[in-house]
Image: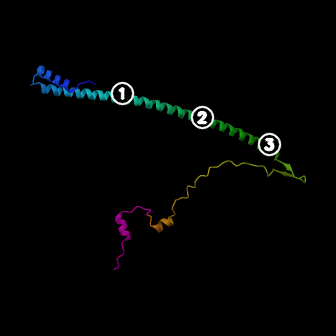
Amino acid sequence: MFDIGLSKMALIGAVALVVIGPEKLPRVARMVGTLLGRAQRYVSDVKAEVNRSMELDELRKMKDTVETAARDVESSMRNQASDLEKDWSDATKDLRDDSNMTSASSFGSYDAEGGYTGLDTHSSVVPSYRHPRKNWRVKRGAVPQWYKARAGVRSKVQSGAARVARFRPKKFH
């Protein structure tokens, strides 16, 4: 900050001794020291605040880039999903149209001997998908109960005193 050497400090001290006097010099020196300390703290606080604001600006820029990238990914996923849904609906529509044509012709048919067979049994009916739900009545554990019982795994909470009383040998009278 200031280019003050030892010789300049001695000159300032001598002038202050002459101007202020030896009685008031220690009090003035203490006050100057506290003021300089406050000034240094204020300068360091300002520097820290500037650094924080710069880092905050960088974080905001980074946040904006991440948000734009996320929006781009989301829009591309939506576009792909809509394209897939459109292709799926077109494919199922084609399959439905084909099955309607075959089922319309399969309402009744004549076999090789000329007999009417009624409905065609060879028509393909695609069953609808059904989610394999878990059977909530059946409790499934990773370790079988018989193994837990044999290995001595505790399945019920018991106090220490109750455990001692349970496994205490019976006294014979």
Judging from the image, what secondary structure is the residue with disc 2 in? helix
If you read the primary sequence from the N terminus, does the residue marked by circle 2 or circle 3 appear first? Answer: 2
Give how far apart the Cα atoms at labels 3 and 1 are.
Answer: 76 Å
Question: Going 63% across and 36% down the picture, which residue do you hit?
Answer: 80
**Residue beneath label 3, please?**
101
Query: Would residue 48 be counted in the magenta stretch?
Result: no
Which segment did they paint magenta? 154-173
The one nearer the camera, 103 or 16, is: 16
If you read the primary sequence from the N terminus, does the residue marked by circle 2 or circle 1 appear first? Answer: 1
Give how far apart the Cα atoms at labels 2 and 3 are.
Answer: 37 Å
On the rendered structure, is 100 left or right of 29?
right
Give residue 104's quadrant in the image.
top right
Question: Going 17% across and 26% down the picture, which residue do you hit?
Answer: 31
Question: Going 79% across and 42% down the picture, which residue do you hit?
Answer: 101
User: Is 136 above or below relative to 7?
Assistant: below
Judging from the image, what secondary structure is the residue with disc 3 in? helix
Q: Position of residue 157 (x, y in %)?
A: 40, 61
Question: At label 3, which amino acid type do we have?
Answer: Met
The one nearer the camera, 120 or 164, is: 164
Give residue 23's quadrant in the image.
top left
**Residue beneath label 1, please?**
50
Question: At label 2, which amino acid type do we have?
Answer: Ser
**Residue beneath label 2, please?**
76
Question: Going 34% across and 30% down the picture, which residue do you hit?
Answer: 48
**Residue farthest front in this picture:** 7
The image's mark for residue 6 is: none
If you read the primary sequence from the N terminus, does the residue marked by circle 3 or circle 1 appear first? Answer: 1
